[in-house]
Amino acid sequence: MKTNKMICPDCGMEMNHHAEKIDYTASLHEWSATDTLFGGILEEVHSCPACGNIETRRASEV
Amino acid sequence: MSTNRPLFIPVILGTTRQGRASENVARFVFGELGRHSGVETELIDIRDIPLTTTDAGEAIKDAKFSAAVTRADGLVIVVPEYNHGYPGMLKHVLDTNLKEYVHKAVGLCGVSAGGFGGTRVIENLLPVMRELGLVTIFWDGNFSAARKLFDAEGKLLDQTYVNRIDKFLKELIWMSKVLRYGRENVELS
C-alpha cells in the first residue's frame, strides 16, 4: 500500500505529520504558488520520532 | 524510542547590548536547568550569531543556531525590557527560523531595571511566540531590579528566585515532554 508519510532523510524512519503552517515569506518570492485562501504557501511540518529531525513540504505537492 | 533521548532545552540570551544585566539572569537559569536530570541545555548568546542586517528571515539562517533549535524540545528566552519592548536583535535572530519552532515549548524570562520584572516585554513577545508556532507556558521568570540581583561575580543575591525558577522550569520540562510526544506520535487529523 502506498504511504504518504515523509521518510526522514537523516535516519530513514517514517516521520509524523503534526502541523500545517502558512509561510507568508515564501509567497513574496513565489506569488504564483500562493494559496489565495490562506494568503501564503501552506507547508506541512513533519517530525521524526527516532532522531527528532524536522522537515517540511508544501501541502500542494502531496 | 524518542522518550529515551534526553530533552534539549537551550537558554537564549536575547540581547547584544554592552553591560547587559540579562547575562547574569541567563547564566543563572542555565545553571538551574542543568540540575534537572534528563535535560541537556546550552547557553545561546545572540551576540555570537553572525547575521547581516541588510536582509532578514530564513534567507540569512545561521546553520549552528538553526541546528540547535531543530534539536530543541523547548526554549528559554531571557529577554530584557527596553522601552517596554523586546530587543530588535532578538526578533531578527528569531525570525531566521520557522519550521524549527513548530509545536515546541517556550518559557520567557523578563528582565527589567525597574520593579515589574519584564512583564511588559513578556506580554509583547507572546504574540510573536504564537506566530512562530511555539507553545508558551503559563509560568514566567520575572527578574526585577536586575542590576541589584547579582554581585560583581554574577552570583545571585536573592535566593527566593531559586524556588520561583524551579516552578517555571518544571512546567517547561513537562510541556517539552508532552509536545515532543505529540510532534512525534500524534498525527494531524
Image (cartoon, coloured by chain):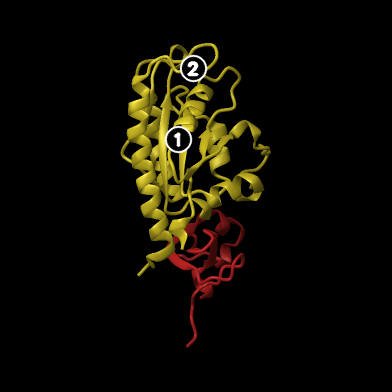
Q: State the quadrant of the C terminus of chain B.
A: bottom left
- Closer to the eye: label 1 or 2: 1
**Residue A37: which quarter of the image?**
bottom left
Name which residue type carries label 2.
Lys
- Which of the labelled discs sits on residue B138, or is there none? none
- What residue is at 61 percent from the left and 64 percent from the top? A10
- Which residue corresponds to the image point at 38% horizontal and 60% vertical from the top-left? B182
Instruction: Name the amino acid type tagged 1.
Output: Arg
| Residue B139 location (% of width, % of height) | 32, 36
Mark 1: few/some/many CA within 10 Å (<14, 14-19, 20+): few
In the image, B25: left or right of B162?
right
Chain letter, disc 2 residue: B
Quick check: do tags 1 and 2 share a chain?
yes
Between the C-alphas of marks 1 and 2, the distance is: 17 Å
On screen, residue B17 versus residue B114, left or right, reads right
Residue tagged 2: B155
| Chain of the residue where label 1 is placed in the rendered structure | B
Along the polypeptide, which appears first: circle 1 or circle 2? 1
Total count of labels: 2
Look at mark 1 in the image and give the residue it sits on: B35
Label 2 residue SS: loop
Which residue is situated farthest in the front direction here? B37
Q: Which chain is yellow?
A: B
Query: Dot 2 surroundings within 10 Å: few (below 14), some, or many (20 or more)?
Result: few
Q: Secondary structure at mark 1?
A: loop
Q: Colour of chain A?
A: red
The residue at the point 48 percent across, 36 percent down is: B34
Residue A45 in sight in this render: no
